[in-house]
Image: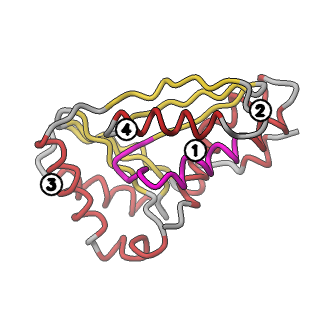
């Protein structure tokens, strides 16, 4: 599965921190791209997980939430093997194990990715991550436009979630990381 949009979200969300905090910004940016690649190509990383990375002078901080504890450990191990990584801080949280949350995740995924507005995403990538914690849903990722953002939110609300937080971004809301690196 092509995870270009997820990689882009990871890079763009956290690049501002590492870009200006370190005199080695270009090296950190290159390292961040490698870290993003490792996270997004990890075979057990799914649309139900959300992992972000920040790099400061070779120190990688992984944050976000995953559905299974082994994912956090494996990602930390894989990232620590990247040339140039001095240290990895694992701040990835574990989502609670719950059959109700699992059912809700799958209902929302079927609604969103089964909808004609999002058919183009089924074969290309999965830019919307569905994070569920005790019936509370957060949508993260990049969508084509504001209409898709609102449609995804509406579809998620119809599944019986307690709350739905919409953190989806459009391409216009995301700055290219190259613009930030000096």
Q: Which region is colored magenta?
A: 32-50
Point out the frontmost of discs 4 and 3: 4
Residue matched to label 1: 10
Q: Is residue 163 left or right of residue 94?
A: left
Image quarter for residue 85? top right
Q: Residue at x 24, y 34 (%)?
A: 133
Q: Residue 10 vs residue 59: left or right?
A: left
Q: Earlier in the sequence, mark 1 or mark 3?
A: 1
Query: Viewer-proximal residue, 15 or 32?
Result: 32
Marks 3 and 4: in contact by CB < 8 Å?
A: no
Instruction: For mark 2, give the secondary structure.
Output: helix
Q: Viewer-nearest of labels 2 and 4?
A: 4
Residue at (52% x, 25% y) in the render = 90
The quarter of the picture where residue 10 lies is top right
Give the alpha-carbon distance from disc 1 to disc 3, as whole Å.
28 Å
Indicate the position of residue 33 as horizontal and vertical percent values: 70, 47
The disc label shown at residue 52, or none: none
- Does the magenta run of residues contain 63? no
Image coordinates of residue 89 in percent, x first then y, are 58, 22
SS for callout 4: strand
Q: Could you tell me which secondary element the residue under label 1 belongs to?
A: helix
**Residue identifier under label 2:** 19
85 lies left or right of 24: left
Q: Nearer the viewer, mark 1 or mark 3?
A: 1
What residue did someone put label 3 on? Answer: 158
- Decide: few, some or many residues near mark 4? Use Cα within 10 Å; few <14, some 14-19, many ≥20: many
Disc 2, disc 4: CB below 8 Å? no
**Residue assigned mark 4:** 66
Instruction: For the residues labelled 2 and 3, say whether their Cβ atoms are less than 8 Å apart.
Output: no
Please report whichever mark, 1 or 2, sits nearer to the chain's N-terminal start.
1
Relative to 162, residue 114 above or below = below
């Amino acid at each position: 599965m092509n995870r270009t949009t997820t990689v882009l979200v990871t890079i763009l969300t956290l690049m501002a921190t590492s870009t200006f905090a370190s005199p080695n910004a270009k090296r950190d940016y290159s390292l961040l791209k490698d870290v993003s690649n490792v996270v997004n190509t990890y075979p057990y990383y799914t649309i139900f997980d959300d992992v972000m990375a920040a790099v400061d002078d070779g120190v990688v901080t992984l944050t976000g939430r995953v559905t299974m504890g082994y994912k956090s450990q494996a990602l930390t191990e894989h990232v620590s093997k990247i040339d140039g990584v001095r240290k990895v801080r694992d701040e990835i949280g574990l989502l609670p194990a719950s059959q109700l949350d699992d059912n809700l995740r799958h209902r929302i995924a079927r609604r969103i990715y089964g909808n004609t507005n999002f058919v183009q995403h089924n074969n290309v990538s999965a830019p919307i991550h569905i994070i569920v914690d005790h019936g509370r849903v957060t949508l993260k990722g990049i969508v084509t436009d504001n209409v898709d953002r609102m449609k995804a939110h509406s579809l998620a609300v119809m599944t019986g979630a307690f709350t739905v937080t919409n953190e989806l971004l459009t391409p216009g809301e995301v700055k290219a990381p190259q613009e930030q690196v000096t």
